[in-house]
Amino acid sequence: MAKRNLRIVTEGSPLIGICETCNTQFRSYSPVKEARQTIQSQFDAHQCKRLDDSQNAARIVKEATTED
């Protein structure tokens, strides 16, 4: 399996990180310094579950059509 990378996508509140391998999102509403540690811990503990192409396409459409 490829090496996993955590990418921080927002710096505000909530702080959001994404696993670049499986696109799992991690969120924290704590102050930034604490939030980075929380997200890193969540990332380290998660197990990647790669999606096949049809599941990935469905996820993209769902994310594009839902409102926050």
Image (cartoon, rainbow, N blue to C red):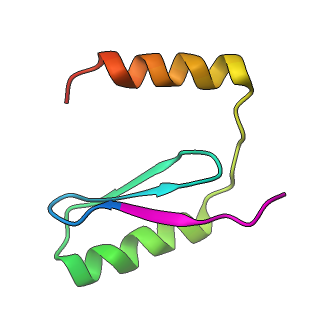
Residue 13 position, x and y percent, is 15, 61
Residue 61 in the figure: left or right of residue 10: right
Q: In the figure, residue 20 lies in which quadrant?
A: bottom right
Is residue 61 depicted above or below 17 in this figure?
above
Residue 53 in the figure: left or right of residue 46: right
Q: For the stretch drawn in magenta, what is the main secondary structure?
A: loop
Residue 9 position, x and y percent, is 34, 58
Residue 3 in the figure: left or right of residue 32: right
Q: What stretch is highlighted in magenta?
A: 1-8
Q: In the figure, residue 32 lies in which quadrant?
A: bottom left
Q: Residue at x 34, y 76 (%)?
A: 36
Q: Residue at x 49, y 74 (%)?
A: 41
Residue 40 position, x and y percent, is 47, 73
Q: For the C terminus, which image quadrant?
A: top left
Is residue 33 depicted above or below 5 in this figure?
below
Q: Residue at x 28, y 19 (%)?
A: 66
Counting labels gives 0
In this rendered view, identify the residue nearer to me: 1 or 47: 1
User: Farthest residue toward the right?
Assistant: 1
